[in-house]
């Protein structure tokens, strides 16, 4: 497992596992909320509400930090996060919460390439078999178990857009976090996403639908704002101060298991035998890569006496 700096990385890995638990509940809960509130209004209120809360708590600190940094240090990752969560929530309108949860774990495919492009980090060839196996798992996941045919609709396309954007956000954040503290970065990300989503809701959606939103849907929005935005953003950014973007994306694959379990509990969504096989392949890849990364590497440098 790639680590940065000194000290143990286990506590930072646990932060990502906690984030996965929060998202595991958040994905099916969002789908429940969409029965009463539109995607754009849910996103706009969720992120603008989270931004207001974080600005109230950390506004002075964030403004002071961002003024000292260049816009290129925080704006790219914030825009990438906005694209990621907009496409993720739109995907829930067209496919199952389980599928969205699995597709959101695919930054593990894209972060090494983006890190090579943006951070000039060597692409580890040893992970290519893992990536190919994950693609096989994705094929089995999206293959309809009843008909045996490959189904890849607009929901899955949006899920892949989400995965690409999340990978970009991880790499951009890893590059910028040495100069910006995790809380200020999280506040910037929530604010940019909130402004964009709320603007889109005001332009493309109808305000008249808001009085019809149920109490349950408002509670879902509150959960998404507090845990899946404020808390989760801080958890992710804190982890990225010690873990590489690839390691974080790999750990976030645990979200797939939790999303599937929560989707069964809350939505009664079931994976077919084919889908379960695909899920098992993806999970096996995560476990194998974590084990391989944690093994001590043989040094090719000889130390002369």
Image (spheres, grey):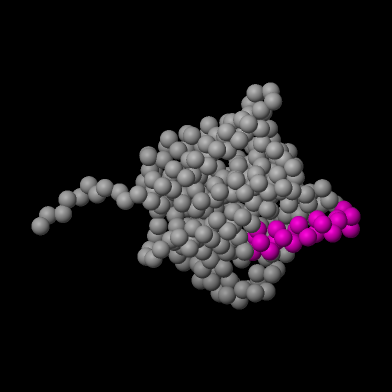
Q: Which is the main secondary structure of the residues drawn in magenta?
A: helix
The magenta stretch spans residue 215: yes
152 displayed left or right of 218: left
Q: How many marks?
A: 0
In the image, is residue 257 above or below residue 224?
A: above
**x and y, in percent, of residue 298 in the image:** 26, 47
Viewer-proximal residue, 78 or 104? 104
In the image, is residue 61 above or below residue 75?
A: below
**x and y, in percent, of residue 88 in the image:** 66, 46
* Residue found at the very far left of the displayed protein: 305
Q: From which residue to which does the magenta span run?
A: 209-230
Residue 204 at least partly seen? no
Viewer-proximal residue, 38 or 64? 38
Residue 221 at least partly seen? yes
274 displayed left or right of 10: right
The magenta stretch spans residue 51: no
Viewer-proximal residue, 139 or 161? 139
Q: Residue at x 38, y 63 (%)?
A: 5
**x and y, in percent, of residue 14 in the image:** 51, 59
* Residue found at the very far bottom of the displayed protein: 60
Quarter location, residue 48: bottom right
Q: Residue at x 72, y 60 (%)?
A: 223
Viewer-proximal residue, 100 or 61? 100
**x and y, in percent, of residue 60 in the image:** 61, 76
Quarter of the picture containing the C terminus is: bottom left
Q: Residue at x 53, y 66 (%)?
A: 182
60 displayed left or right of 249: right
Q: Residue at x 53, y 61 (%)?
A: 15
């Amino acid at each position: 497992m790639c680590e940065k700096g000194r000290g143990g990385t286990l506590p930072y890995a646990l932060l990502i596992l906690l984030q996965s638990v929060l998202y595991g509940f958040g994905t099916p809960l969002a789908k429940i909320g969409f029965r009463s509130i539109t995607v754009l209004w849910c996103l706009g209120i969720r992120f603008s509400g989270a931004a207001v809360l974080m600005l109230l708590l950390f506004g002075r600190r964030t403004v002071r930090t961002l003024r000292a940094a260049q816009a290129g240090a925080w704006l790219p990752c914030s825009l990438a996060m906005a694209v990621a969560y907009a496409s993720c929530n739109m995907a829930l309108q067209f496919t199952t919460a389980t599928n969205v949860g699995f597709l959101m774990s695919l930054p593990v495919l894209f972060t090494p390439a983006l890190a090579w492009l943006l951070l000039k980090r060597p692409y580890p060839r040893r992970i290519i078999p893992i990536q190919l196996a994950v693609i096989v798992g994705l094929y089995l996941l999206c293959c309809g178990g009843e008909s045996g045919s490959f189904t890849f609709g607009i929901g899955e396309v949006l899920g892949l857009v989400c995965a690409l954007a999340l990978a970009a956000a991880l790499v951009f954040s890893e590059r910028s976090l040495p100069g910006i503290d995790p809380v200020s970065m999280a506040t910037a990300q929530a604010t940019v996403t909130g402004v964009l989503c709320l603007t889109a809701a005001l332009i493309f959606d109808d305000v008249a639908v808001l009085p019809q939103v149920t109490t349950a849907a408002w509670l879902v929005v509150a959960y998404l704002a507090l845990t899946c935005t404020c808390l989760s953003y801080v958890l992710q950014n804190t982890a990225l101060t010690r873990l590489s973007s690839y390691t974080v994306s790999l750990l976030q694959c645990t979200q797939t298991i939790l999303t599937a379990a929560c989707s069964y509990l809350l939505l009664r969504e079931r994976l077919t035998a084919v889908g379960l096989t695909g899920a098992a392949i993806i999970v096996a890849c995560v476990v194998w890569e974590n084990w391989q990364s944690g093994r001590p590497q043989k040094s090719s440098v000889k130390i002369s006496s």
